[in-house]
Image (cartoon, rainbow, N blue to C red):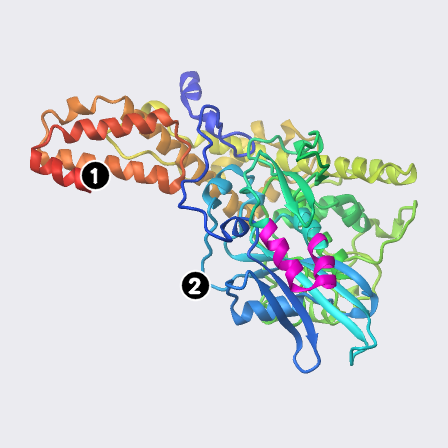
């Protein structure tokens, strides 16, 4: 019915999962007085230094701030992952990153985390279960050392996936540390402790070691694929010229994925459906960059399975992820050790990346994936090793356009933009029907009653959704042919679907809670309590106070005037009670 369609709360379910914040207060998270290291903890967990000890091997030499606690397992993982597996090709300075599990039973406070997560894209929200480590490794000849080499790594540890920003940050802090020692790293941490909170949508200037970084963290409301305002804005920071970081998190997809570009659509399907993938690369830098490029192929959708930009045989999850007693888990691993070529032979999808080669010619032999069994060693030819049959027909247009760009020496920034746009449109064509269907699960606004509990989103019925595809499927926005229904069915069994739908439920139910609050504020509550017993009136007061607590606890996007009206309602209702009850309620 047309009126029903208009009455649905479709405005709260946009095509990318954002909620309209117009008219909503954007005030800082209500927190206590700022303590030392509170600001730093909004960005980093700590800065570590790992050295090579002749007796102990890799050892944690330094952690700052020094009050930060790490479990023994976390320390072990950081130590082993901070050095390249094979140092033969890593003379000089090398940068890469890793991701490890945070040990259970310990939580860390991030002052603005709730407000940050509410406003940031899901792919940039803080990770409650993992740390990201950004490594700056230095290996140089040193005659004074018994090993003949100086080998150390400085590691920036964080819970937010600002891949580009923190890689840049490590490159600023590490050289100073290697030259001046611990005081330099301490000074850098004190600089970071003066940074503003990482608020999405704001242009931020971050002073560090005598320079200034200019960034802008994306928001949920940003149009996917849009250029960050950080690169457009004229820098103003005390007359100095900051270093502009165009994106805090995006890697260069074309450079990272060029070796397997003919298979980009097949790879997109593997990532979308959470298939187990291992990337074998010659160095930790290439390895970690490639993993992040893969995870971002489905942006703005968040990749919900585990992924390890750099994984070694010493990792605490090594046995869990390499066992042959069960099917490989839904995870993307990045490895450099030749040992993995045999250990992971049973994995269904292997991407082999070689050393970077400057060539204008496309390799025709790479146009077809190879069988996994043909990968015997890490020296095997670069390419994709899989027997996976894609659901969608191949789109050769983008591959030809990018190949032509290589021949005409098109700037890499343009190549990156073209590839990102292609992958974004592919993901949006897949997700828009899902977003449209979720909008249809919304209850009618007229059914939201102040006298009942807030309604919730209806359950997701996969069969009902699949029936909508005939008239409202991806064919409306994509010219690709193929088995879209088969791809959706596979997607439904993945963690990516679970994570996406959980996030949509959370956002929609928050929106419904706000609309229920509006209904309460617009209701004549004094008229309702006029003929009610005292116990019912007290119960209403307690429920209204619970609503107020929810606003604070969940950081709901509520207009300030609604909070004020609700407070006045509570005060007015209390005055209708006997004085003894008034005293009790006012004292609480």
Depth check: give the residue in front, 420 or 284: 284
> Is 262 within the magenta?
no
Q: How many marks?
A: 2
Residue 424: x and y in percent read 67, 36
Q: Residue placed at 50% from the left, 42% from the top?
A: 117
Q: Which mark is residue 105?
A: 2
> Is 180 within the magenta?
yes
Q: Which mark is residue 542?
A: 1
Give the quarter of the image for residue 545: top left
N-terminal of the two: label 2 or label 1? 2
Above or below, comparing residue 407 to residue 41 in the picture: above
Q: Image quadrant for the C terminus?
A: top left
The reply, left or right, for residue 297 in relation to residue 545 is: right
Describe the element under mark 2 as helix, strand or loop: loop
Above or below, comparing residue 266 to residue 180 in the picture: above
Q: Which mark is residue 322?
A: none
Depth check: give the residue in front, 30 or 17: 30
The reply, left or right, for residue 225 in relation to residue 259 is: left
Q: Residue placed at 80% from the left, 35% from the top?
A: 414
Residue 16: x and y in percent read 56, 33
Q: Specify start and end residues of the magenta stretch as a single range.
A: 172-191
Residue 512: x and y in percent read 38, 32
Describe the element under mark 1 as helix, strand or loop: helix
Residue 187: x and y in percent read 62, 55
Most common SS among magenta residues:
helix
């Amino acid at each position: 019915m047309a009126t029903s369609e208009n009455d649905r709360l479709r405005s709260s379910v946009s095509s990318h999962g954002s909620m309209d914040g117009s008219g909503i207060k954007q005030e800082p998270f209500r927190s206590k007085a700022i303590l030392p290291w509170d600001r730093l903890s909004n960005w980093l967990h700590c800065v570590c230094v790992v050295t090579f000890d002749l007796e102990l091997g890799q050892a944690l030499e330094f952690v700052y701030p020094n009050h930060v606690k790490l479990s023994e397992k976390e320390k072990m993982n950081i130590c082993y992952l901070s050095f390249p597996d094979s140092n033969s090709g890593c003379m000089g300075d090398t940068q890469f990153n890793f991701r490890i599990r945070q040990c259970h039973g310990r939580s860390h406070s991030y002052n603005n985390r709730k407000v940050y997560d509410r406003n940031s894209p899901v792919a940039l929200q803080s990770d409650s279960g993992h740390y990201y480590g950004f490594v700056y490794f230095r290996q140089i000849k040193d005659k004074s050392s018994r090993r003949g080499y100086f080998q150390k790594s400085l590691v920036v540890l964080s819970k937010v996936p600002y891949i580009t920003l923190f890689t840049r940050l490590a490159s600023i802090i590490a050289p100073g540390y290697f030259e001046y020692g611990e005081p330099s790293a301490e000074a850098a941490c004190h600089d970071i402790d003066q940074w503003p909170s990482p608020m999405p949508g704001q242009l931020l200037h971050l002073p560090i070691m005598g320079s200034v970084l200019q960034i802008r963290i994306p928001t949920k409301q940003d149009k996917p694929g849009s250029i960050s305002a950080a690169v457009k804005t004229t820098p103003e920071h005390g007359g100095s010229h900051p270093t502009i970081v165009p994106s805090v998190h995006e890697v260069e997809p074309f450079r990272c994925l060029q070796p397997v570009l003919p298979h980009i659509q097949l790879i997109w399907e593997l990532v979308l459906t959470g298939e187990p993938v291992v990337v074998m690369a010659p160095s930790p830098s290439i390895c970690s960059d490639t993993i992040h490029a893969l995870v971002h192929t489905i942006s703005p959708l968040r990749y919900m399975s585990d992924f390890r930009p750099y994984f070694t045989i010493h990792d605490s999850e090594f046995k869990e992820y390499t066992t042959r007693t069960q099917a490989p888990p839904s995870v993307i691993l990045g490895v450099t050790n030749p040992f993995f070529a045999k250990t992971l032979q049973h994995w269904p999808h292997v991407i082999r990346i070689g050393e970077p080669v400057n060539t204008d010619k496309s390799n025709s032999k790479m146009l077809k994936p190879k069988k996994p069994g043909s990968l015997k060693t890490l020296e095997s030819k670069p390419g994709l090793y899989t027997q996976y049959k894609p659901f969608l027909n191949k789109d050769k247009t983008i591959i030809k356009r990018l190949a032509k760009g290589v021949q005409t020496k098109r700037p890499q920034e343009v190549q990156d933009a073209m590839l990102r746009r292609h992958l974004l449109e592919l993901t949006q064509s897949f997700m828009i029907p899902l977003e449209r269907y979720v909008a249809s699960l919304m209850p009618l606004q007229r059914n939201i009653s102040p006298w009942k509990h807030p309604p919730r989103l209806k359950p997701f019925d996969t069969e009902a959704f699949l029936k909508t595809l005939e008239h409202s499927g991806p064919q409306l926005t994509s010219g690709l042919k193929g088995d879209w229904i088969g791809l959706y069915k596979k997607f439904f069994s993945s963690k990516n679907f679970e994570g996406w739908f959980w996030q949509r439920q959370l956002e929609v139910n928050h929106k419904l809670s706000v609309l229920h609050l509006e209904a309460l504020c617009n209701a004549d509550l004094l008229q309702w309590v006029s003929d009610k017993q005292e116990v019912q009136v007290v119960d209403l007061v307690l429920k209204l106070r619970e609503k107020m607590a929810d606003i604070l606890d969940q950081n709901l996007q509520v207009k300030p005037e609604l909070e004020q009206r609700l407070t006045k309602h509570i005060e007015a209702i209390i005055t209708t009670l006997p004085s003894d009850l008034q005293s009790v309620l006012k004292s609480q």
